[in-house]
Amino acid sequence: MFLWPASPAAAEEQVAFTIRDERITESSGLAVSRRHKGVVYTHNDSGDVPVIFALGPDGGVRAVLTLGGANARDWEDIAVGQDERGRPAIYVGDIGDNLGGAWPYVTVYRIPEPARLRSQTIRATAFKIKYADGPRNAETLMINPRTNRLYLASKLFGGKVYQAPARLRTGGFNVVREVSGAPPIATGGAFSPDGRTCVIRTYLGARLYSVNPDGTPGKSLTSIGLPAQKQGESVTYTADGTALLVGSEGTNQPVYRIPLPEQALPSDAPSQAPSPENAGTSGTPDEEGKDASTTRTGMFLALAIAAAVGYGLLRKRGEGS
């Protein structure tokens, strides 16, 4: 595990809650429940059984949802959307590939979000995913709440965002195609509850994007500093869309609440002046390949990338032993 340098833009962070459950050692994704107020879903990374943990406002586990018929090869991210009938559903991405192309396809699983929150096994629907330009590693899964369309972001130097078909199918493969750029070494992402913006994070920071009329991520709006974390991989918006929640792998890890700049607030949110650190400057499409670490030295980025690659290879070897 690695401790990344703190960002000067993270001065307003506060701990929303701390995950305190011995079963959660590699929280790799976060998603806010649509049905249960104050509940946030998370899951472990590779090497665990196929379960989703429902966390309460205090960080304790309220329920464990087991995905019947699913595998947990390398789960990396989670999002809440709808099924084909418009009912709330939870999507989890078995999309990691530490060797950057060893797997011919990856899988996204979906379960209905239960109306009653209790530990149970729910049969999962599996969607096989292929990239139009060849297999790659990814740790970011996002769902646009306006279109219910799924997006993945690759974890590369030249990161890309890929759009899934409008309707996922269970037979054959769902081919995802590039629609925009992403920050290098993307580790998580999410759309805002109103679908106006989306965010993609890295180990060192995050970048906020507008959303185009067709639902795809648009131009870069600003960078957002994140606190120092053991291995920060998860991000989602709060239920009211006024802040981000960011988490990390490791035991007893805090989940931070990061207020959003005014330009990213939902239209019905009270106006608030953005702090100088979080306000940032408006970006251009050419800046989509940059993340918040651009304000820091290139040394930190190089160290992060080298550490991420080394960690992936070591974990891969460990899985095979």
Image: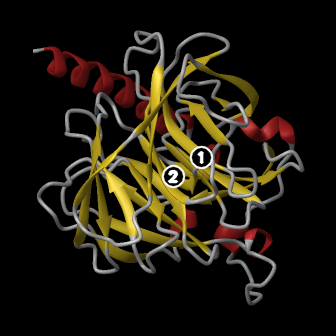
Which amino acid lies under the numbered mark 2 shown in the image of this protein? Ala
Q: Is residue 219 above or below residue 133?
A: below
Counting from the top left corner in percent of width and height, residue 148 is at: 68, 50
Q: Secondary structure at mark 1?
A: strand
Q: Residues within 10 Å of mark 2 (few under 14, many from 20)?
A: many
Hey, which quadrant is residue 256 in on the image? bottom left
Q: Is residue 201 above or below residue 238?
A: above
Regarding residue 230, the answer to whether it shows in the image is: yes
Regarding residue 229, the answer to whether it shows in the image is: no
Looking at the image, which is closer to me, 74 or 109?
109
Residue 241 placement, left or right of 321: right
Describe the colour scheme in one phrase: secondary structure
1 or 2: tag closer to the N-terminus: 2
Quadrant of the image containing the C terminus = top left
Q: Residue at x 64, y 53 (%)?
A: 199
User: For the residues marked 1 and 2, what is the alpha-carbon distance in whole angstroms?
Assistant: 6 Å
Q: Which residue is mark 1?
A: 142
Q: Residue furthest right?
A: 213
Residue 176 placement, left or right of 285: left
Q: Which mark is residue 321?
A: none
Q: Is residue 83 above or below residue 276?
A: above
Residue 172 placement, left or right of 102: right
Q: Residue at x 78, y 40 (%)?
A: 287
Q: Which residue is mark 2?
A: 79
Tag 1 and tag 2, C-beta contact below 8 Å:
yes
